[in-house]
Amino acid sequence: MNQRSLLGALIVTIVVMLRAAPATAEPYLAVMTGYKCNVCHVNPTGGALRNDFGITYAKVLLPAETVDNTLDSWTGHVTDRLRIGGDLRTDWSRDTAPNSPSTQAFALEQFRVYADLTILPDRLGIYVDEQVAPGGSQNEEAYVRYGSTTDGFYVKGGQFYLPFGWRLQDQTAFVQQVSGINMTTPDKGVEVGWEHSAWSAEFDLTNGQANASTGSGYQVVTQVVYTKPIWRVGIAGSSTQSGAGDRHMGALFAGLRTGPIAWLAEGDVVQDDSLERTLVGGLLEADWRVLKGHNLKLTAEYEDPDRAVRNNQQTRYSLVYEYTPLPFLQLRAGYRHYFGIPQNNSQNQQLTFFELHGYF
Amino acid sequence: MNSRSATALSRSGMALSIVLLAACAGNGDGLDANGQPLVPGGSAPSPLSADFESIQENIFTPICSVCHAGASAPEGLRLDAADSYNLLVGVPSTEVPSLDRVKPGDPTDSYIIQKLQGHAAVGAQMPDGCPTTQPCLSATTIGFIQQWIMNGAPPAAATATAAQSAPLAVTSIVPDNMEAVNAPPPQVMVAFNHELDVSQLSTLSAHFEKLATAATSTVIAQVPAQISVSSANLRALMIWPAAPLSAGHYRLVTDATSATQISDIGGQQVALGAPDERGETVISTFDIEALP
């Protein structure tokens, strides 16, 4: 069996063994390359629309096979001032939980389109991230941006994702669930950011998800990241003031490259004042670049939904294979196994998925 | 960074990975299925599964019906065990009427899923206040609701079976009995224990009457009503005001030309409403309190 056949067999094997949630960020690539998020993404905090270099990376460096000439002209630019992009993810998944019938289905997980309009080069722009399917059109991000997102200060105003820890592809990761900050929960407000050399910092003042319908309260989020070529470390904090009860959160996260493996780790602590509850979430992820265009992702996660309650901890382990045969096309297959208290079926389920991801 | 530091960091990463890999899930001792400490003398609910009975017991009753119950239920959506199914399945949401709260077979276009996931076009993510004052439902928990919807959103099997052996009867009217609600109800729901014969709907008509006072039957305004039964749930008759109701005392009565009996698909009949002293058939009476 030659190398290609072996890889094919490996993919098929994994395919028959997770469920993915929609999103577009892959921070392991940043750790693997030593880049800051703004090197590949228009949004300085990462995710969604890719910039010129991000498109080049997607065309040349990420896939197993490059396509000569035909894609050379595609840079995401419709005009000099308007850039567009998108992600479409569709999958087949199978859920199995104790004492419940297994289910399997094909699904369109997401089709999202992005646009960035430059009004004044390097100073003023408008950014939109719109989910157009499934269901009706739904705005994820829409903001006005003033300032430089590559070196110096910038200000965003509108609706956007909050910066808090790793912006993972999997929105169901425990650290994303514990904090409640992920790429399905944009918030409205303003963000002041600073990008300089190895430093990235953001300060956000927003409504807070808990205050969405109350017209009172606010949320403050701050994040600082220091990035070096083979490692980085970040710290984030958040405080939500709400009539229903305040919430305070902290996160410490780090990345490290050792040879072909990128390591990501994050620990979150959340304090709910009104509930007198402390939650803890942890993530460890290893991404092994097996070959160009092939990535094996292993994750181990931990969640304690209430430190004051004993015997309620949950863990989750995932194995995901990502194959990018061609520019702008990725095949993902994975398996996740949840372990929780035995009396809760959903905390002990197994998910298998096979996903087709097209992007531009 | 020099190679020694990199090695040290690498070893730290390895150590952290071993710790995480070795972390064990809780054994659940002393906890109920939701991971909460058992109350002495209380009984633990059955584990969550993708059927309505389990979802009601594990999610709607302990979490949602804290707010979504009684006269002050937001959007008129009561998620107590008696009313939740009939007010969810095949019923248009009040925030986005183009979407049913639960659309059998289509979790993506079911408004409840959008609200639980925080994707809904209107209002806050549910449970209200999550994640600040209480945890949001986890993706896996929402997954069980999605799976139930994908399976066609069937009612609780035990309830449906037991009702078949009983005569056709009204099981619930929301709102009714001079109940005071703090917002105009989007509809009056009349629930039955059997599936209705929808071919007879055209013989039914009704209207809302606004009364001068709760104690008198002096009508000061009338609002026409539309009657419907969702094909997704043939056990619930929905009566919709043609225009929003304002604060005041109301009763819902059948028109003079309307039939006053309704049949199930087996031919059994039951009266829709009860006659008052004026000979009108009253289906429901309720008050809408003026909001502060």
Image (spheres, coloured by chain):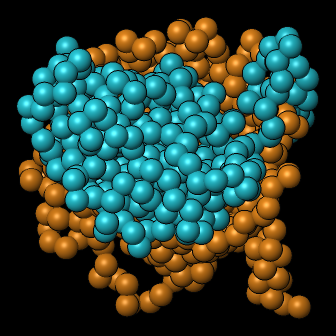
Residue B237 falls left or right of residue A104: left
Q: Give percent across and percent down for residue A201.
A: 38, 29
Q: Give percent across and percent down for residue B107.
A: 52, 60
The chain coloured cyan is B
Q: Nearer the viewer, residue A262 or B266?
A: B266
Query: Can I make out residue A245 in this image?
Result: yes
Picture quarter with the C terminus of chain B: top left
Q: Is residue A116 above or below residue A243?
A: below
Residue at 17% of width from left, 65% of height from top?
A82
Query: On the image, which quarter does residue A200 sit in?
Result: top left
The chain coloured orange is A
Q: Give percent across and percent down for residue A263.
A: 69, 45
Residue A61 falls left or right of residue B262: right
Residue at 31% of width from left, 44% of height from top?
B281
Q: Nearer the viewer, residue A266 or A136?
A: A136
Residue A225 falls left or right of residue B215: right
Q: Give percent across and percent down for residue A194.
A: 31, 31
